[in-house]
């Protein structure tokens, strides 16, 4: 008997049994979503920001903090910007140089695309805010499932941290719902706001890290309530560590810079996808990716826990990917040399792991449980699927399929990305 192998199988059995012991109900997210406790050292060249920071302050002391915008514009390249805890409403900006953004030790800074809304008027059993002039671009129609027509609208309202559902007219507003009357600049909610905190989205996107900001670092921060995306990463070598990206209208993070390291973050309750990327050599490690595609966009198009497109050399390992109304881990359209290992992927509506229109994947050591399907190779080639444990898929545990789609890009075809299923190896997986 191989003692090491038997011990690994025993550990996997205990893990599998623990998956079924989890009660999978949608939590009251007012209390459930948190930022991790962090305690990053504060260097001598640090600048400080706070929710009540002022541009006229020095920024060099916790007692004289700047605003977010002032810090991003004025801190010199190579500096560290330290965020005091609290709520940074309507926080947005661009990083145009190498900076480190981090939380003050043991504090929880939330950067939000929302504002606190006051001045409500009772209007026949619902409550009205006049002078509401915030509106946002609609998401692409091809993303939309016809059964959820309001999903394209990325307005959001929260009462004591609990989201309300958007409806299409004033007459349909009831408890737990809201309506935006853009023509008359009015916002309606069906919950009495007296004594409560009401937040509504007022900013399209959060922080943009542009191409001049190579090797920037963002760690220990929370990002929420942005109508589109909380963060766009366009620079190379960026590190995102121990952040929380929650309740954003489309995506938590969009990655477009090569060699990004995304480690220990939480991506949860985003409207379309937790994280999407189209850059080379991305490392996704130790993240929690859960409850994304809450707007129920089409699960066969752009929605996902995480979705990578046209990336080479991505590594996705040791993540927890669960309860997404979509595929959990999805590589699509000419991904090359992708490694997907040692992830726990469970309770996702569609495939747990989907490797589609891609080439030379390595999918191994994953525990894939209670998904729509387990692992799917769709129009992909030269991919090895080995040593995975697949449990209780509602459809099929492993699918290798081909379709009439073929690649027409000569450069990609020369690298083997033909979009034809061939030369795949499925070996030594446990199907339960």
Image: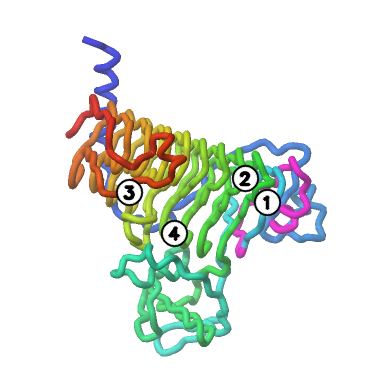
Describe residue 184's horizontal placement relative to residue 387 as left or right: right
Q: Residue at x 82, y 53 (%)?
A: 58
**What element does badge 3 sit on?**
loop
Q: CA distance from mark 1 to mark 4?
A: 30 Å
Q: Earlier in the sequence, mark 1 or mark 3?
A: 1
Q: Can residue 157 be seen? A: no
**What element does badge 1 sit on?**
strand
Mark 2, residue position: 235
Q: Can residue 74 be seen? A: yes
Q: Residue at x 57, y 55 (%)?
A: 110
Q: Could you say where residue 98 lies in the image, as x and y percent from the top left?
A: 70, 43
Q: Is residue 403 magenta?
A: no
**What element does badge 2 sit on?**
loop
Mark 4, residue position: 30
| Mark drawn on residue 327 | 3
Q: Residue at x 54, y 84 (%)?
A: 185
Q: Residues within 10 Å of mark 1 (few under 14, many from 20)?
A: many
Q: Quadrant of the N terminus?
A: top left
Q: Quadrant of the C terminus?
A: top left
- Comparing marks 2 and 4, which lies closer to the viewer? 2
Q: Could you say where residue 60 lies in the image, as x and y percent from the top left?
A: 79, 48
**Residue interval drawn in magenta:** 67-90
The reply to whether discs 1 and 2 touch (Cβ–Cβ < 8 Å) is: yes
Q: CA distance from mark 2 to mark 3?
A: 27 Å
Q: CA distance from mark 2 to mark 4?
A: 33 Å
**What element does badge 4 sit on?**
helix
The reply to whether discs 1 and 4 touch (Cβ–Cβ < 8 Å) is: no
Q: Earlier in the sequence, mark 4 or mark 3?
A: 4
The quadrant where residue 202 appears: bottom right
Furthest residue in direction bottom, as rendered: 124
Q: CA distance from mark 4 to mark 3?
A: 26 Å
Mark 1, residue position: 95
């Amino acid at each position: 008997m191989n003692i090491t192998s038997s011990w690994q199988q025993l550990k996997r059995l205990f893990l599998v049994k623990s998956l079924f012991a989890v009660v999978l109900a949608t939590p009251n997210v007012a209390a459930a979503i948190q930022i991790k406790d962090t305690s990053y050292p504060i260097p001598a060249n640090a600048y400080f920001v706070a929710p009540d920071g002022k541009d006229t302050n020095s920024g060099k002391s916790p007692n004289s903090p700047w605003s977010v915008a002032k810090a991003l514009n004025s801190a010199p390249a190579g500096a560290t910007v330290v965020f005091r805890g609290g709520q940074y409403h309507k926080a947005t900006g661009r990083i145009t140089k190498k900076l480190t953004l981090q939380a003050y030790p043991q504090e929880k800074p939330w950067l939000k695309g929302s504002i606190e809304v006051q001045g409500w008027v009772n209007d026949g059993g619902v409550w009205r805010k006049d002078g509401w002039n915030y509106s946002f671009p609609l998401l692409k129609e091809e993303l939309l499932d016809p059964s959820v027509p309001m999903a394209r609208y990325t307005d959001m309202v929260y009462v004591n941290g609990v989201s309300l559902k958007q409806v299409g007219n004033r007459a349909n507003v009831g408890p737990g719902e809201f309506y935006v009357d853009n023509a008359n600049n009015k916002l309606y909610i069906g919950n009495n706001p007296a004594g409560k905190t009401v937040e509504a989205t007022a900013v399209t996107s959060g922080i943009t890290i542009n191409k001049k900001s190579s090797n920037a670092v963002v760690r220990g921060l929370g990002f929420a309530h942005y109508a589109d995306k909380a963060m766009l990463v366009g620079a190379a070598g960026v590190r995102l560590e121990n952040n929380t990206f929650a309740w954003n209208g489309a995506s938590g993070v969009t990655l477009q810079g090569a060699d990004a390291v995304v480690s220990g973050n939480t991506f949860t309750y985003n409207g379309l996808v937790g994280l999407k990327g189209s850059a080379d050599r991305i490392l996704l490690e130790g993240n929690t990716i859960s409850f994304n595609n809450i707007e129920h966009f089409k699960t066969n198009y752009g929605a996902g826990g995480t979705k990578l497109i046209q990336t080479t050399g991505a590594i996705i390992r040791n993540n927890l990917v669960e309860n997404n109304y979509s595929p959990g881990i999805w590589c699509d359209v000419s991904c090359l040399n992708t490694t997907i290992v040692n992830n726990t992927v469970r309770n996702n509506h569609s495939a747990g792991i989907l490797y589609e229109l891609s080439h030379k994947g390595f999918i191994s050591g994953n525990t894939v449980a209670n998904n729509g399907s387990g692992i799917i190779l769709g129009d992909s080639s030269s991919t090895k699927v080995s040593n995975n444990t697949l449990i209780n898929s509602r459809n099929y545990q492993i699918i290798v399929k081909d379709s009439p789609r073929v690649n027409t890009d000569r450069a990609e075809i020369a690298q083997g990305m033909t979009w034809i299923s061939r030369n795949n190896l499925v070996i030594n997986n446990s199907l339960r």
